[in-house]
Amino acid sequence: MFPVHRGHLDALSTSIGIYQHARADRPDPAHGYCTDDVSRALLVDLLHQREIGWDTVAPSAIRNIAFLGQAFEEATGRFRNFRTADGEWSEAPGSEDSCARALYGLGEAIASCPPGAPRDEARDLFERALHASSRVTHLRPMATVLLACDAAERGGLRGEVAEVYQRVGHDLRSVFESRLVTHAWPWPEERLTYENELPARALITGGYRLGHRRMARIGLRVLDWLIDAQTWQGGVLSTIGNAGWWSKGTEMAHFDQQPISATSLLLAADAAHRATGRERYAKAMEMSYGWFLGRNILGCCVAEPMFGACHDGFGPAGVNENQGAESTLMWLMAVEHIRALRAAPPTANEVAPRVPAAVR
């Protein structure tokens, strides 16, 4: 395994947060910062502390929690997303995606930060943001809110968190039980786009945690379908490309492929492996990880492991030379989840139900 390398992460970061974009390997301040990437950077900090300790990542984690606090609007209960290089906010409020991602980052901070001010700040902000951020209506934000509640519960929060967890879990499951879902197309929309495995991951995690067996089975079925659809010749991952995506009744686009898609599958497979112990999901994680290192349809290396960086995916002509925040953070997440898998493969039902199992 590669050692923890935060070189590019540090290069993209300032006293405010992490720049969204880069030109090649150099930060591009023109596009400033966004709550989406700061929330992801916080997740990476929390993963890295397992290997290099809290003291090493604390300055970055504290800065990222502070950014989310500054992004929060008390009047709306939501988070702003985009911020210029000089610190001025340019949007209010942010999208459902960005608000849900902020909530999830805070939830994981509650679960993983050591006792002290940063954890207390994350908890206070989570509780103030939960009501508005949980009123999401789109598929992926619903999934992210579910994961946020799961993390906060692991961190000891109850009350409204438990109520939101149940409500959003029910709503997400209901979406996947709609009349649009068929055996051949087990997806509640006419088109698959980005981060498609995120709802499956949330259904699996929530289903096992809440004891909703049917919910977990739906998530596993959707994930199995996505794994099979994106496993290419030779057992390599070919993710759904953003130059056309994949509409029902058509062939999926294979370009341009992006790191967020590979890591989305890896994280969902990790949740499935922890819940079931099935080797199929460990293999899917390794397949996703291999995508970064050249086991893809172009045979190109997307990650730069010795610099802790990652290119912004690839198209028909090859790798995108830019190494922005989202892509780099997706690579760093993938490394840490594979490190955990290889160090101590989880056993079946590690995610124990907190209520008696029932078919619902």
Image: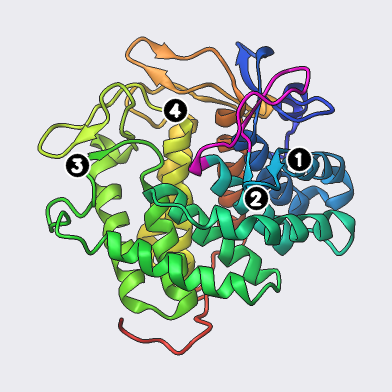
Amino acid at pointer 4: Gly
Is disc 2 placed on a helix, strand or loop?
Answer: helix
Is disc 1 placed on a helix, strand or loop?
Answer: helix
State how far apart marks 3 and 2 are (Cα). Answer: 30 Å
Q: Position of residue 350 (x, y in %)?
A: 53, 74
Which stretch is magenta?
Answer: 80-97
Residue 98 versus residue 218 in the image, above or below:
above
Q: Which comes sooner in the sequence, label 1 or label 2?
A: 1
Q: Which mark is residue 105?
A: 2
In the image, 194 versus 240, the foreground residue is 194
Q: Position of residue 245 (x, y in %)?
A: 27, 30
Amino acid at pointer 2: Gly
Q: Which comes sooner in the sequence, label 2 or label 4?
A: 2
In the image, 254 versus 133, the foreground residue is 133
Q: Quadrant of residue 149?
A: bottom right
State how far apart marks 2 and 4 are (Cα). Answer: 30 Å
Magenta span dominant secondary structure: loop
Confirm or deny contact between disc 1 and disc 2 (CB under 8 A). Answer: yes
Q: Quadrant of residue 156?
A: bottom right
Q: Which comes sooner in the sequence, label 4 or label 3?
A: 3
Which residue is most to the bottom? 356
Q: Which mark is residue 294?
A: 4
Classed neighbour count for the residue bearing mark 1: other residues with Cα under 10 Å, few (<14), some (14–19), many (≥20): many
Quadrant containing the C terminus in the rendered view: bottom left
Q: Which comes sooner in the sequence, label 3 or label 2?
A: 2
Residue 95 lies in magenta, yes or no? yes
Amino acid at pointer 3: Glu
Tell me what residue is drawn at x 44 percent, y 64 percent: 168
Q: Is residue 127 left or right of residue 198?
A: right
Is disc 3 placed on a helix, strand or loop?
Answer: loop
Q: Is residue 237 visible?
A: yes
